[in-house]
C-alpha cells in the first residue's frame, strides 16, 4: 500500500503543477495576447469549453458539476 500512496502523491503533485501552469497561461494570455508560443490558445480553448457546456443545457451543468467535484480537493499551491 505504500507504493500506491506514493503514486497518488506524485499524481496529486503533477495535477497541482498543471493547475498552476493553467493559471499562469490564462494570466499571460490575457496580458500579452494569443501570440505566446505555448500558452496562446488556452483562453480560446476555455471560451470554447464554456460555450460547449452552455449550449448543452442540463447536461453541461452536470458535466460542470462533475469537473468541479473532481478538482474540489486540489489546492492552488
Image (tube, rainbow, N blue to C red):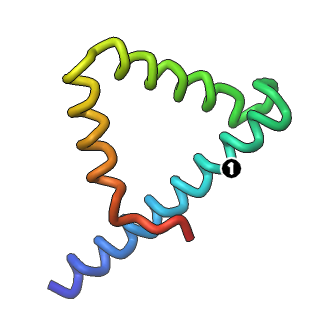
Seen at 28% across and 15% down, the residue is 56
Q: Quadrant of residue 9?
A: bottom left
Q: Position of residue 15 (x, y in %)?
A: 44, 59
Secondary structure beneath label 1? helix
Seen at 27% across and 25% down, the residue is 60
Q: Which residue is mark 1?
A: 24
Seen at 71% across and 29% down, the residue is 40
| Residue extending furthest toward the bottom | 2
- Looking at the rendered image, the quarter that the N terminus falls into is bottom left
Horizontal side, residue 57 vs residue 17: left or right: left
Q: Quadrant of residue 7?
A: bottom left
Front residue of 76/17: it is 76
Q: Please state the total of marks drawn on the protein image.
A: 1
- Does residue 71 lie above or below 62 as drawn? below
- Does residue 16 lie above or below 45 as drawn? below
Q: Position of residue 62 (x, y in %)?
A: 21, 33
| Residue extending furthest toward the top | 55
Horizontal side, residue 1 vs residue 5: left or right: left
Q: Quadrant of residue 51?
A: top left
Q: Position of residue 24 (x, y in %)?
A: 68, 50
Category of crowding for the residue at label 1, using alpha-carbon neighbours closer than 10 angstroms: few (below 14), some (14–19), many (at least 20):
few
Front residue of 28/11: it is 28
Seen at 58% across and 47% down, the residue is 22
- Does residue 67 lie above or below 37 as drawn? below
Horizontal side, residue 57 vs residue 72: left or right: left
Amino acid at each position: 500500500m505504500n507504493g500506491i500512496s506514493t503514486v497518488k502523491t506524485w499524481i496529486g503533485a503533477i495535477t497541482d503543477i498543471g493547475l498552476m501552469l493553467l493559471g499562469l497561461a490564462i494570466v499571460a494570455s490575457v496580458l500579452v495576447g494569443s501570440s505566446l508560443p505555448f500558452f496562446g490558445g488556452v483562453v480560446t480553448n476555455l471560451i470554447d469549453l464554456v460555450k460547449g457546456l452552455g449550449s448543452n443545457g442540463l447536461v453541461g451543468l452536470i458535466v460542470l458539476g462533475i469537473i468541479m467535484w473532481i478538482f474540489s480537493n486540489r489546492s492552488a499551491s
